[in-house]
Amino acid sequence: MDGLWICDRVLNIVRSREQEISLILVNNELGDMAQYRNLMGEITALGRISQEISEILEKGTLPDDYGTLVTGTFGETESS
C-alpha cells in the first residue's frame, strides 16, 4: 500500500460521512439539539481532515523533510 492510496481512501470515507450528515440535516432527522451540536462538531472535524489530506495530495511528488509520497518513502528521510 502506498501513501497516496491511503490518503485517497480516507478522503473518500470522510466525504461519504459528510454526505450522510448532510442528508440527516436536510431531511430534518434530528432527535434533539444535542444531536445537532454533535453532528456540527463532526462535520467541522471532517472538513479539517479533508482539507489536510487534500493538501497532502496536492503536494504529490514534492520532496519535503519526510520524503515523498509517490516514491513510497512516506515517513522516511532521504539519505545522500
Image (cartoon, rainbow, N blue to C red):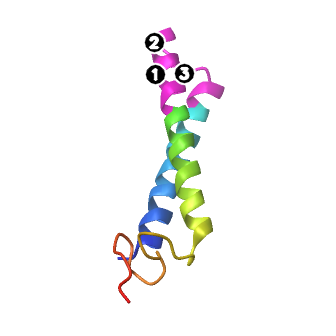
The amino acid on which the numbered mark 3 sits, given as a three-letter code, is Glu
- Furthest residue to the front? 80
Q: Decide: marks 3, 2 in contact (CB < 8 A)?
A: no
Residue at x 48%, y 31% (from the top left corner): 42
Q: Decide: marks 2, 1 in contact (CB < 8 A)?
A: yes
Q: Residues within 10 Å of mark 1 (few under 14, many from 20)?
A: few
Q: Residue 34 got which mark?
A: 2
Q: Which residues are magenta?
A: 24-42
Residue 71 is left or right of residue 24, and the answer is left
**Which tag, 1 or 3, sits closer to the chain's start?**
3
Q: Residue 29 got which mark?
A: 3
Q: Residue 38 got which mark?
A: 1
Prevailing secondary structure of the magenta residues: helix
How far, Cα to Cα, is label 3 from label 2?
A: 13 Å
How far, Cα to Cα, is label 1 from label 3?
A: 13 Å
The amino acid on which the numbered mark 2 sits, given as a three-letter code, is Ala
Point out residue 8 in the picture as x, y percentages from the top left corner: 50, 65
Magenta segment: does it hold 35?
yes
